Image (spheres, helix red, strand yellow):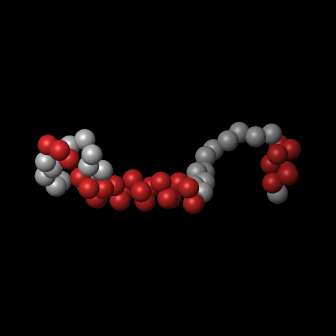
Amino acid sequence: MAPTSDSAFFTATLSDIDPEIFGAIRDELGRQRHEIELIASENIVSRAVLEAQG
């Protein structure tokens, strides 16, 4: 973490103070905006649904 002066305390951005955290948040936001994450889970369904799925 970079040292800050008293005058920068209220004006410094996250990217100025901690570029690593800023980058991680930016990357995660991009991942959530541009990718879909399908999570397999176990479900109980009717026989008709199972037949429709093949």
| Closer to us: 4 or 46 | 4
Residue 35 in the image: x percent, y percent?
57, 60
Residue 49 in the image: x percent, y percent?
82, 45
Q: Is residue 30 left or right of residue 41?
A: left
| Closer to us: 17 or 35 | 17
Residue 37 in the image: x percent, y percent?
57, 55
Q: Residue at x 63, y 44 (%)?
A: 42
Instruction: Count every numbered label the image shows and give the total.
Output: 0
Q: Is residue 26 left or right of residue 38?
A: left
Q: Residue at x 26, y 49 (%)?
A: 12
Give residue 18's quadrant in the image: bottom left
Q: Residue at x 25, y 41 (%)?
A: 10
Q: Is residue 52 left or right of residue 36?
A: right
**Which quadrant, please, contains the C terminus?**
bottom right
Q: Is residue 14 left or right of residue 5?
A: right
Q: Residue furthest front?
A: 7
Q: Residue at x 28, y 58 (%)?
A: 19
1 w.r.t. 10: above or below? below
Residue 4 in the image: x percent, y percent?
15, 49
